[in-house]
Image (spheres, rainbow, N blue to C red):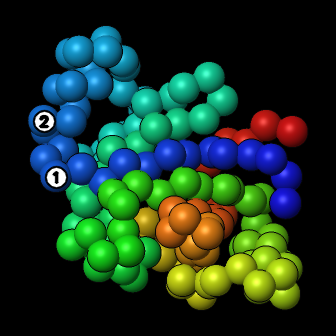
Amino acid sequence: MKQRITFITLGVADLNTSIDFYENKFGWKRSEMSSGDIVFYELNGISLALYPLNELAKDATVDAGGSGFKGFTIAHNTRSEEEVNTLIQSLREKGVQIVKEPQKVFWGGYSSYIVDPDGNLWEIAFNPFLKMDE
């Protein structure tokens, strides 16, 4: 697996409060990829996303109540669905815990979730809307 982080997604209790903080306190500008229920900030090669905590937990198929979910995920994006499958199989063979098997997702992509030794969730995803550099 290449050393790459594409998105850090924070599960937030109140999206508007978080938007106010990042835009009005930090002075960050919202990315054009943002929509009504998710906000992106481009950060020099990676993006920070803000997404409602309960919805993010639901997407990862974990409990949002704090037992096993820390309120954020780290995303590693691939160039195809096949690459997601290949990477997940490779990680499985190395003993990595797969939390969510690869599957098509509601936002139009294809993703899976794994967990690191500290319980941090990594999304392994193909996002057909994401422009990736070489």
Residue matched to label 1:
13
Establish if 71 lies above or below 40. Answer: below
Establish if 31 lies above or below 57. Answer: above
Tell whether 94 sits left or right of 116: right
Q: Quadrant of the N terminus?
A: bottom right
The percent position of residue 65, horizontal first and vertical second, equals 21, 72
Q: Residue at x 46, y 38 (%)?
A: 48
Q: Amino acid at mark 2?
A: Thr
Q: Residues within 10 Å of mark 2 (few under 14, many from 20)?
A: few
Residue matched to label 2:
17
Q: Residue at x 39, y 82 (%)?
A: 61
Q: Residues within 10 Å of mark 1 (few under 14, many from 20)?
A: some
Name the foreground residue: 55 vs 115. 115
Q: Dot 1: what SS?
A: loop
Q: Residue at x 37, y 48 (%)?
A: 10
The percent position of residue 128, horizontal first and vertical second, equals 62, 58
Residue projecting furthest to the front = 118
Corner quadrant of residue 43: top right
Q: Are marks 2 and 1 in contact (CB under 8 Å)?
A: yes
The percent position of residue 75, horizontal first and vertical second, equals 58, 55
Tell whether 50 sits left or right of 90: left
Q: Amino acid at mark 1?
A: Ala
> CA–CA distance between discs 2 and 1?
8 Å
The percent position of residue 8, horizontal first and vertical second, equals 50, 46
Q: Quadrant of the C terminus?
A: top right
Q: Dot 2: what SS?
A: helix
Residue 114 seen: yes
Establish if 116 lies above or below 79. Answer: below
